[in-house]
Image (tube, coloured by chain):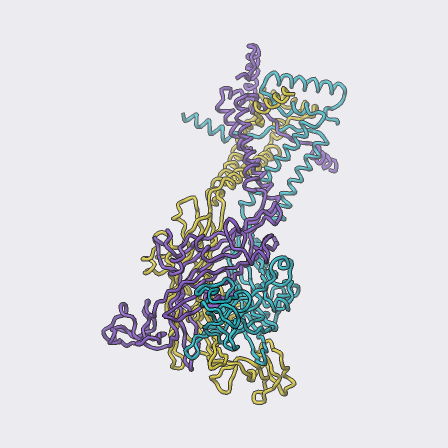
Chain colours: A yellow, B cyan, C purple
Amino acid sequence: MKSQITNALSDFFFEYETPRQVLVRNRRVGVVCRLIQLGVLAYIIGWVFIYEKGYQSTDTAVSSVFTKMKGVGYTNVSGRETVWDVADYVFPSQGDASFVVMTNFIITEGQKMGTCPELPGKHTCSSNADCKGGSFKRTGHGQMTGVCVNATKTCEVLTWLDMSISPPIQQSKIKTNYFKTQIIFSLYYKLVFGLLRSNLVEGIDGLYISKCLYDPADAPLCPIFKLGDIVKLSGFSFEKIAKEGGAIGIVVDWTCNLDVHIKHCKPEYSFHGLYGNANEMDEVRTSMGYNFRYAKHYIENGVSKRTLLKVFGIRFDIIVKSLARKFDIIPTLTAIGSGVGIFGVATVVCDLVLLYLLPKREFYKNMKFKYTDTEVQVRSDVLLLFGFKHKMAAGRHPTSD
Amino acid sequence: MKSQITNALSDFFFEYETPRQVLVRNRRVGVVCRLIQLGVLAYIIGWVFIYEKGYQSTDTAVSSVFTKMKGVGYTNVSGRETVWDVADYVFPSQGDASFVVMTNFIITEGQKMGTCPELPGKHTCSSNADCKGGSFKRTGHGQMTGVCVNATKTCEVLTWLDMSISPPIQQSKIKTNYFKTQIIFSLYYKLVFGLLRSNLVEGIDGLYISKCLYDPADAPLCPIFKLGDIVKLSGFSFEKIAKEGGAIGIVVDWTCNLDVHIKHCKPEYSFHGLYGNANEMDEVRTSMGYNFRYAKHYIENGVSKRTLLKVFGIRFDIIVKSLARKFDIIPTLTAIGSGVGIFGVATVVCDLVLLYLLPKREFYKNMKFKYTDTEVQVRSDVLLLFGFKHKMAAGRHPTSD
Amino acid sequence: MKSQITNALSDFFFEYETPRQVLVRNRRVGVVCRLIQLGVLAYIIGWVFIYEKGYQSTDTAVSSVFTKMKGVGYTNVSGRETVWDVADYVFPSQGDASFVVMTNFIITEGQKMGTCPELPGKHTCSSNADCKGGSFKRTGHGQMTGVCVNATKTCEVLTWLDMSISPPIQQSKIKTNYFKTQIIFSLYYKLVFGLLRSNLVEGIDGLYISKCLYDPADAPLCPIFKLGDIVKLSGFSFEKIAKEGGAIGIVVDWTCNLDVHIKHCKPEYSFHGLYGNANEMDEVRTSMGYNFRYAKHYIENGVSKRTLLKVFGIRFDIIVKSLARKFDIIPTLTAIGSGVGIFGVATVVCDLVLLYLLPKREFYKNMKFKYTDTEVQVRSDVLLLFGFKHKMAAGRHPTSD
């Protein structure tokens, strides 16, 4: 038993199996197949490894974005001058990755709850029966009371009233306002492969930041942006987007190769107009800008009141895109392994040429295959023997073609 | 030297190595192994390439989501009628991907800072010594002043007071309110492989949007949703979630094959009840709904006041899931290469059968291996010779089994 | 025709090709190559499959995060005591994944719009000509009116005024406030591979939550955190960050193996100081904390007023990192396939040793290759024959080395 195991182990460890190869000395096949093999090698080394970095594995980052705005805006509404600062025109205030800069608004101050007739047009009535009390209309502004107002021939609704106009109506005055230049300050961190990295990379310090302004060519790493520049880089017209509102995506691209020094890992900013303006998508689809309703509630003399703002503005979405690559043995060996497999395919292709296309394919077939079927093998040997003898007698080598 | 290099190059380029194969003509082994090989081929072509699209590489999108709500709600609290519109019941106002629709609330108006005794129960005291001034209790409502109030036998705290009730107490009246149907309008963009795509796909334009309403079967691409429909599709009961609050995730799934025309790249909406209601998770764990405290501060007659709302509502999280696939030469060749490797495994399995299981395994072993050990090789040759002669003499082919 | 197809099919299905192998019985080569092959096998099974779980494919989760804070803060400003609760110090109120806890502030109450001279320093003037009406300065506080105020020799600006001080100035009093302990309650869901999973895992129910407090060692799954603990775990000094503000990232790591029972899929919390304090990054770069401006607008006696807060606080970003792994046939077979390819590389290496480095390399070359060039083949055969005869005559085996 023990000697059986020893023999088996000895057989296993002291033997080495190597495939027996047929060495075809044929110029045409040789050149073609060598070129195919070199091609596969070039693909594996050149493309998979060097160009596509197939020896690296990837990871994405988790990130956190903070923003801060500076600057003021000014409006003159019917002689009433107002200055708007950051606390007034940025929604929300705390500096998220997604925020709106108000550039235009319709303001209705001091609204209080009450009843008034609907706007003419969609909710006409001739008698109270046409106005179903306690219900809503999809495009209505409030809940219907069940009364049909004679003066306007529209249903009466319970809603927020604009007290500054008499008699009270639903809509208020439109005021157009534009804001001057503002500056966004962005600072954020990303966590990838356990590393913490900020967009304040080497060379970007407090001193640089206090003076710099982002420029795609001259200052591509400065995290301070002028609002007008961002709008222009995103392809929008400032006048149009300021009036109707719109949305711009600021994509911060971190594509880093962690096999080199970390200082080469720098962000790239790009600006995309997402929504609003007359770009190709909106021409086809909707052309409304970006707006939302915002109210500031308070109590005045015991009465619940609110100031309603229909805010038109530019919505910014700071989106962090990240990809980090680092050397990893597994993708490396997978690439090598499947590359060897492709070599196998190259061999199959060359074999097909050898065994089916060349003039001497029968000869090569007999060289390549050893038959377990005796008759076939004998026939093969005889052929080879006669083939050799014949050619040798004629003084020619079998491979001279 | 030069001739040496020339010879070496000539040897390299004009030669072609092909493995010498043994062609076993055995019906059983042949069929089994061909079936295994065809199986591997079917796996590679059918499953890896066609079904799992192994020839494509993937990318995910960065996206931006905007939402807008329409519709009003109505409450009647102790005879006081109020209509709530978008500016009143959506938090936050600016149309983010994550927002809350208030469906129920507890309101305390006109609170002002002052001292009052704690609610009975957790903070009982018999003398001032029991109330440590300047400290907090984990479940308390304010900072203790150090006084024990005789009337209630609870510690006095400094906190926001509800002035509408006398004597002032901490809690206020519970008012239940339900909101009628609201409609959410969603519009967003995604950026993938450098492409910009909106969920306003072909066929969805301004006209369609003004009329349509989302339905999983009839209008699966309409980006307008009825609140009640979303709640139902997520598996929640509207009454329960409106009262206690809850959370619903709207997953927008973009799974696109970029090898076909972009018009086939369309979003799929699905609704998931995340939190709230009596679903299986909450029955086991907590059963509280979703709520938060919100205050509107203002100054009245020089006094700082605030209106406190404990807001119960449905929180919506619009989550974009995306996967884009596109043809790429590297995954294609990796799949082919490792497929060739699997063929190698198939060959190993068949060899094992041939060399260890079949009756004529010794014969096949001798056919397959060429021994460098002369004695062994001679023995092998002799065996083969005698084996052949014997079988030929008997008129039988070695392979008739 | 039919018999041709029958013959072809019969040839195809009833034959089996296996590579002919040369069995080299050489102790050194055998041991070395077997070790290399065992090494490759150990790599594939041990590292690729077991350690790196190469048989699994991965998926990431989409998640939704809700937070809730409890606790109060207390400030005493010039004798005026105020208690701050959740509705006062958390921005925003609705419990997002990203929120700010106010720890310090500068408050200016009852601001109203008006003109006043700029702060001395940057905007000095000697006459009205120096102050360009209708324009802004980048570091200014409002729009210039065009008037140079004699008393301060600075330009007059239109801006929000602090009415509590006479004459009105731009800045207000600095008040430092610290908040006591607060508690954050987090609860969220994640969707992966179609599964819904909450961080209220097995064993975490309503009863446990009402009592527990997160501790990295004792209660790593309790989703209730003490603010001071989070600050400490992130490496910040509470005093410093409370005063200047800062940002902390709470990373919730879900790395799950879905081949085992789902109950092993649990979250891991880690805390990262992102911004603020004197950590290594900020020492080099900027050292400002985290703050933003926030205003509460209201109308008093018909006049638009606002209370401005410069909020310093700790910004929390709850970031969900997720990776789920599950058995998949494709990565399994890809790993096997390319592993077979690596075996091929091992064979190439051993062949190189055999054919170019060993003393008997000519012998092995002749064993391995079958030449289609007749002359070469005859020479090879003769060499082998004489080599054998010679060695046999000398009573030595060819392989005794």
Q: Which residue occupies the extreme bottom position in the image? A: A151
Q: Is residue A273 visible?
A: no
The part of the image, by quadrant, that contains residue C141 is bottom left
**Residue A198 location (% of width, % of height):** 41, 54
Q: Nearest the camera: A217 or A199?
A: A199
x, y percentage for residue A323?
Answer: 47, 50
Q: Which residue is at the front of the view, A332 or B42? A: A332
Q: Is residue B381 visible?
A: yes
Q: Is residue B196 above or below residue B224?
A: above
**What is the tally of numbered marks visible in this picture?**
0
| Quarter the N terminus of chain A occupies | top right
Q: Residue furthest left?
A: C126
Residue drawn at the location 51% of the way across and 29% of the way down: C349
| Depicted B381 relative to depicted C175: above or below | above
Q: Position of residue A179 (x, y in %)?
A: 39, 71
Horizontally, is A296 left or right of A149 in the view?
left
x and y percentages locating residue C304 in the rendered image: 41, 78
Residue depicted at 49% across the width and 24% down the height: C356
Asked which quadrant contains residue B282, the reply is: bottom right
